[in-house]
Image (tube, rainbow, N blue to C red):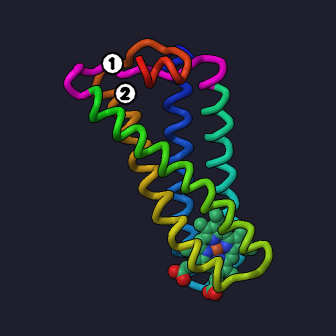
Amino acid sequence: MTWHEILPAVCTSLIVVSAVLVAIGWRLIRRGRRDAHQKVMVTAAIAALLFFILYLARTLFVGNTSWGGPESLRMVYLVFLLFHIVLATVAAVFGITTLVLAWRKRFARHRKWGRSTSVIWFITAFTGLFVYLLLYVMYPGGHTKPVFEAIFG
Ligand code: HEM
């Protein structure tokens, strides 16, 4: 296995682990376990941050992988990828807002934002996993090149 194969798998695992932790954290607060909720949610945020750092490093130093599947599915894949990227960005903004509200002890608002953040994060993780499967498992990965080249050809 090369770094080109290992890094995407590690990144995808981090997103999935983060989403599973958010689900556990939600369950914990529903049961009234505030301290455990805080610890698990902060760990989920660290996993997401780690993903972002690795993703950024990969984009800068290795490049992103272009579509290697059939040409007929290229457009569908790109729209799906764009949807995932937009969702991940929204999830990051919502995540930071949710954390800030918790730290300021504004729990009524935190609760509202937390629910939306969690749901958006679940969809982000699911679509991220699907992008990984499409790009590396279901079809042979294309060439690795810088981000703009990978998207625009
Ligand atoms: C990004 C990280 C976090 C997410 C996604 C999140 C998510 C949530 C969600 C979904 C709820 C509402 C549960 C429900 O009623 O269905 C909630 C409530 C709560 N969270 Fe978080 N949380 C996060 C971080 C934190 C942190 C760091 C703290 C501690 C400082 C915290 C403290 C609380 C408390 C005390 C409540 C209960 C609020 C109430 O019942 O009025 N959360 N959180």
Q: Is residue 67 magenta?
A: yes
Residue under the point 32% across and 33% down: 77
Q: Where is residue 106 in the image (x, y as percent from the top left)?
A: 73, 82
Residue under the point 61% across and 54% down: 92
Residue under the point 48% across and 51% down: 87
Residue under the point 67% across and 27% down: 57
Q: Can residue 40 be seen in this view?
A: no
Q: Where is residue 20 in the image (x, y as percent from the top left)?
A: 50, 57
User: From the viewer's perspective, is residue 80 above or below residue 123?
Assistant: above
Quick one: label 1, few (<14), some, or many (20+) residues within 10 Å? some
* CB under 8 Å between discs 2 and 1: yes
Q: Does the magenta stretch include residue 26?
A: no
Q: Is residue 134 visible?
A: yes
Horizontally, residue 19 falls left or right of residue 133, namely: right
Q: Which stretch is magenta?
A: 58-73
Horizontally, residue 142 falls left or right of residue 147, namely: left
User: From the viewer's perspective, is residue 40 above or below residue 9?
Assistant: below
Q: Which labelled disc corresponds to residue 68? A: 1
User: From the viewer's perspective, is residue 32 above or below residue 153?
Assistant: below
Query: SS for tag 1?
Result: loop
Q: What is the spatial separation of the Cα atoms under label 2 and label 1, in whole angstroms?
A: 7 Å
User: According to the image, label 2 marks what residue?
Assistant: 135
Task: Name the residue nearer the viewer: 125 or 80.
Answer: 80
